[in-house]
Every structure is written in C-alpha cells, then in structure tokens.
Image (cartoon, rainbow, N blue to C red):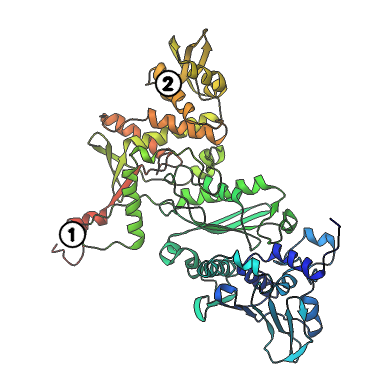
Amino acid sequence: MAIRLLSDEVASQIAAGEVIERPASVVKELVENSLDAKATNIEVRVEGGGVRLIEVIDDGCGMAEAELPLAVMRHATSKLSSAQDLFNIATLGFRGEALASIASVARVTLISRAQDAERAAMYVVEGGKSTPLQAHSHPKGTLVRVEDLFFNVPARRKFLKKESTEKRVIEFLCSQYAIAFPQVRFKLQQDRHPSFQTTGKGDWIELLSLFFGRDTARQLLNVEFMEEGISLHGFISPFNVTSSHRNDILFYVNQRPIKDNALASAFIKAYHGMLMVGRYPLGVLFIGLPVHEVDVNVHPTKAEVRFRDKERIFAAIVRAVRRTLISSSPIPQVYPSLSGASPSAADLQTQQFATDGKRAIDPAWQFAHEEPEGGTEPAFDTSQEELGSGVLKGFVQIPLLRQIGQVANAYLIAEGPDGIYLIDQHAAHERILFEKMIHQLKAEPSSQILLEPVVVQVASYDNTLIEKEVDLLRKIGFQLEPFGGNTWIIRAIPAILERVSPQTALKAVLDELDEDETPLQHDHEAKLIARICKRSAIKAGTSLSPQEQEALLRDLQACEAPRSCPHGRPTMIHLSVDTLERQFNRKGPKSQL
C-alpha cells in the first residue's frame, strides 16, 4: 500500500479525537479558556446533552478582532512562547489545540470584544471551513457557540452515552471548576432549565453542596497543611460519613482538577483503621505546588499530571488528612428512638454508624482480600510519624474515663465528664494490641522468651509457608529454628501474645499468612498484625476483674486512634447527659421538674 500525506481536514479530525472525546470535553476546554481570560462570570448553556448546542459566555478580557481567525488555528496560543514555558505552566490551557479541534468537528460561532475595543467581532467556522469576519454587537468578553457536534463524523456520535449521561458528566465537570474558582460566578443551564448557579462569594457550603449535598457538606472537616514547597487545603469527611465508591475523592493541583489513583490511595491510607470494609471517605483536596514541580503536559485532555517528587506529596496528604481526623473526629453518639427530641440529619448519620458498628461483629465485616474497584487496596498507615509522633500525641482523643463495670461480659461501662461511655472490650483490645505491634515494627521486636522451647510439627504446606515468611515472623517477635522435616522449635513468641500457647500463636499467624495471596510487605504486614490482634484480643463473653477493666481503659486512652479498632468498628459509643435527661423527662417541654 502506497504512503500518502493526509489532508489537513482528516489530520484535524484525527487530532480532534484526542482532545474532544465527548460534549463534556468541549465544555471543559471552553470553560478553561474563560478562566484563563480572568472571567468573573461564566454562563454555560447546553442542549441535547451537548450534541445540539454548547454555548459558553464570559466577561473575560476578550480577543482583538484580528486574533479571531488565529484562535481557531492549530497550535495558536497566547499562553506559550517557547519550549521552556512548558515547564512553567500557570494557566489551565496551553496547547493551542482546543478551538481548532472543536471547529473541525462542529459548527462554531466565535464572538468576542476586547476590553479596550469599541465593538465586537464574529467569526464562524463549520467543519474547519471559515467565513469572513463580521462586526457584531456584544458586551466585553467572549461567546463561543458550538452546534451540531460531530456532524461531519457521524461514527463518533454512535459512541456517545445516553443524553442523560452526557448531561450528568457536564454538570459534574462544571461543578469541579466552580469549586476550584470560588470567586467566579458560574451558571449552568441544560435544555433551558437551570442546573445550578453559584454566587461567586466563596461560600464553601454552597460549593461543596454541588458534590455532596448540603447535609453532608456541613459535616466535612477543614484541612489546612503547609510544608516547604507544598500547601494543602480542602475538606474531608469524618470517619462516620462514607461512600460506597472512590469517586467522591476529588483532587486539584494548582486549581487544575486531576485524576490520580495513587493520590486517592494516599488519601484512603490516612483513614486506615477508621472505616468499614468496602466504605470510602469523601473529600476535596487542593494541592499547591511551584509550577516547575509538576508537569501538566502529559495527556491532551490535561487531566493527568506528573510530579517531580511524588512520594513527598503522598506523605503530605497522609499526614494532613490523618492529623485532621484524629483531632476532629467525634465519638459515635447514642440517640434513642424513645427520646422526645428529633435528632438532626448529622445525628442520624452518626447513630447509623454506631448501629453498623454493632453489626460488624458478623464475619462478613472482616477484612476483604480482593482489591476495591478502581485501584489497589488502601494501604495501612504504619508510619512512626502518624502513630507515634509528639504532634499527634498532643491531641486529646477521648476524655478521662472512670471505670464502672461490665455488661454481658462484653461491654465496659465508664463515666466521662459529659455522660456514659460503652466500650466494646474486644474492639478496644484489638486497637491496643494493634498499636503496640505496629510500634514494634519500627523498633526491635518485643518477644517473650519461653522457659522451655516448644517443639511443633506442622503440615507440609505450613512448613513451606514458614520457610517463605520466616523473616517476617521474626520481625513481629517469633524466634523459630528448623528441627528437621516439618518440625520447628519455638523459642520465643510476640510479647503481646504471651497469654496464648506457643502452638496456638504460631497456628493463628500461619492461618492469616495462608489467607493472603500477595507478598506480606509494607502495608500487608499491618494487615497481618490486624488479623492477629483480632484473634488474640479479649473475646466477648470474657469476664474481666475491676483491675483488668481499669487497665483496658487506661491502655485505650493511651492509643493514638482509640475510637475504632483496626478493622474500622467503633470501640465505644457515647450516651450524653443531655440524652439521659431527655429519656427521664427531665429536660424539654414535658419536664415537670
């Protein structure tokens, strides 16, 4: 087959396929142009899911009449002048391809008036073919009208989603830019019906409500973090406000919305030990970096970026989110249905979390081994900084509690300054054991030397497992020696398992090792420890002496994250004095006292 040069029209349509994937791609490019033009008002009008009409109107700086034909030519831009500028990009757009790509697959009308111009000009392009410039009446700013998208590439239309889906994507995209630029007034209208409108006054509740709804937005926690060369700010959910998927975690780098599964994993890692299996946090994080530290020239859609020091950014996200959670997350409250007062939406959500926590005793709530949808399993936070730093130890996690007694040999009752606390003894002991073992990973393993070594014979597959993971077993406190065949000598076990027989301790660990198909390294070590703690912790049904109850409470208060066990179940719930007074009719309109 002979090699031939493609026509400009075909080449433009091929290039357009990389930039303009769907109607939302057009909206994205046009809104970014408006923001780069310093617009304070942006109105987006859409019809037919963006296929029939997309119109973006702004009050930005506008374009001079002579620049309109240049604007729709490929690689024409006002934002770059040399290759070196690619490494110092401070604008949202920079490629000079957007308008040219749109004009090659749609009918485009461009009307603009520069700030110092006496009149506006109009320029029309249909499928890459233009008409002469015309004078036009228009206020200062720019209007771009895109009609009949993909009219000359009908095959592309067949791959679009349903109109309702395209409309949702456009609304989500406009919401992303509205929250990134809180001082800009956004208005979105779809099929002549308003979708949303912002005031441009920087009201974060208003903006966060676009993503999460007003009730959820009010519960989000404010994050502020500064480190040399990195700034982080935004909003995250407390551990009792969760989602069933990872799509409610949004990231911005220098106000540019981006997609990055690795950043999402770092965000989720900060919630380790606080969430139920299969639940994910919500959040909006703005990352500020020097422009030379991030490369945005990675993909035509500009939704992906590369970082010069990725690990440092990940660590900053974990630290910022973790500190905010530990200092701000509430203890689940009890709101009895018999109470005369109606709890708020936030109260109901906390009450539901407490109820789910009780259900979590069921084996179905145990750690899942499969990867969650959309990325790798959230890593465990085992860093010394997060579990043992002096900064975090400065936070008051739970109030000083006075031990009262035990109920059903499963729950401890304690009095605090503001009511009664019910502590799940098994979950609390899990948390205590987990943090002790995690700290041991950062130092010499704490082992309990046996007075008399114990000889154990294991199954052949367990023997293979021990040989493979003997270094890990030693790291967590076992001292093992081969004794020929499938026989091993146990000379020491982890100190926290001293109440368990050596044979039982080794078998418990081997059972957990056998469940994992992946190598137990890094966060997998913490997963293994969490499972060991679950098996080794005090079980429900165990009677504790007053001294043991008191010791459990003190050890729990010494934990850095005492409110939940390593698997995410709450260790305690709170019955406030206010709730007690309402229950006994001592408060409210019915009270006669």
Q: Residues within 10 Å of mark 1 (few under 14, many from 20)?
A: some
Decide if residue 280 is in sight here.
Answer: yes
| Residue pictured at 48% horizontal, 30% vertical | 437
Q: How far apart are marks 2 and 1 (CA)?
A: 55 Å
Q: What element carries label 2?
A: helix
| Residue pictured at 33% horizontal, 53% vertical | 352
In this rendering, would 569 be left or right of 78? left
Residue 507's disc number: 2
In this rendering, would 22 be left or right of 539? right
**Residue 395, percent across and down?**
47, 47
Judging depth in this view, the residue of 479 and 256 nearest the camera is: 256
Residues at circles 2 and 1 in contact by the CB criterion of under 8 Å: no
Q: Is mark 1 on a helix, strand or loop?
A: loop
Image quadrant assignment for residue 458:
top left
Outermost residue toward the left?
592
| Residue pictured at 86% horizontal, 57% vertical | 2
Amino acid type, label 1: Arg
**Residue corresponding to mark 1:** 586
**Residue 439, percent across and down?**
51, 32
**Residue 293, percent across and down?**
73, 54
Q: How crowded is mark 2: few (under 14 residues within 10 Å), some or many (20 or more)?
A: some
In this rendering, would 551 be left or right of 163? left
**Residue 266, percent across and down?**
57, 47
